[in-house]
Image (spheres, rainbow, N blue to C red):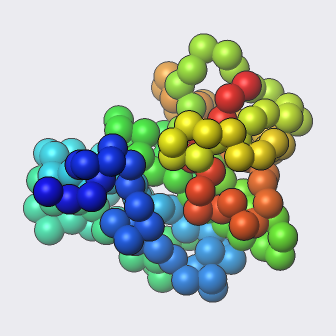
Amino acid sequence: MREYEKTGLLSMKELQVPSKKQLAKGVAILECVQEIPCNPCVDSCPVHAISMKDINAPPVNDFEKCIGCTKCVGVCPGLAIFVVKVKDDKAWVTLPYEFITVPKVGDSVQALDRTGTVRSKALVKKIVKHGKTMVVTIEVESCLAMDIRNIKV
Ligand code: SF4
Ligand code: SF4
C-alpha cells in the first residue's frame, strides 16, 4: 500500500518536485497519483508539457516545457493541479476553488496546507473563472510554496 493510501495525504516524496530554477519561472504541480481514466489536463496544455503513458496512468509534467500559464488548473475535475511560482521571499500559488464563499482580489484570506491546517495569511492577487471552478492566485511567504494548497475566505 502506498503512503498516501494509509495517511490520506500526499507527501513530497510522492510528488514531482520542481527545481528552484523551475519554481522561479512558475510551474504546475500535478498532485494526481491515482490510476484513473482522466486526461483533460493533457488536452488543456498549450505547450504539451503534460503527458501520460496511457489514459489510466498518472500525469507527468515536463517542468522544462511548462510555462506556468495555469490553463490546466481549472480543467482538472480532481482539483489536483496547482501552479507555484517563487521569487525571493514571496510565492504565488494558483489553486482551484469551488466553495460558496467567494474571495475578491485584494482580500486577505487564510492559507491552508494539505491537512486543512491554517498556516498563514495570504493575499488574493488574481481570480479567473473556469466554469464553476475559480482559479485563484494567492501570495504567501516563499517557505510555504510547496505546502499551501487551499484557502479559507
Ligand atoms: S501551467 Fe500551462 S504550461 Fe504548465 S502544465 Fe499547465 S497548462 Fe501546461
Ligand atoms: S485532469 Fe486532474 S484528475 Fe485528471 S489526470 Fe489530470 S491531474 Fe489527474
- The quarter in which the C terminus is drawn is top right
Above-or-below relation of 72 to 12: above
| Looking at the image, residue 58 lies above or below residue 25 | above
The one of 8 and 139 positioned closer to us in this rendering? 8
User: Which quarter of the figure has residue 142?
Assistant: bottom right
Q: Is residue 115 above or below residue 63?
A: above
Total marks drawn? Answer: 0
Q: Is residue 89 visible?
A: yes
Residue 69, compared with residue 97, is above or below; it is below
Quarter residue 105 falls in: top right
Tell me if 109 is positioned left or right of 76 in this view.
right
One can see residue 75 in this view: no
**Residue placed at 14% from the left, 57% from the top?**
1
> x and y percent of residue 27 in the render?
55, 67
Look at 68% across and 39% down and name the residue there: 118
Q: Is residue 56 left or right of residue 28?
A: left
Q: Position of residue 115 (x, y in %)?
A: 51, 42
Q: Residue furthest front?
A: 6
Q: Residue at x 34, y 66 (%)?
A: 14
Relative image position of residue 101 (x, y in whole percent): 67, 16
Residue 114: x and y in percent read 51, 46
Q: Which residue: 59% across, 56% down?
A: 147
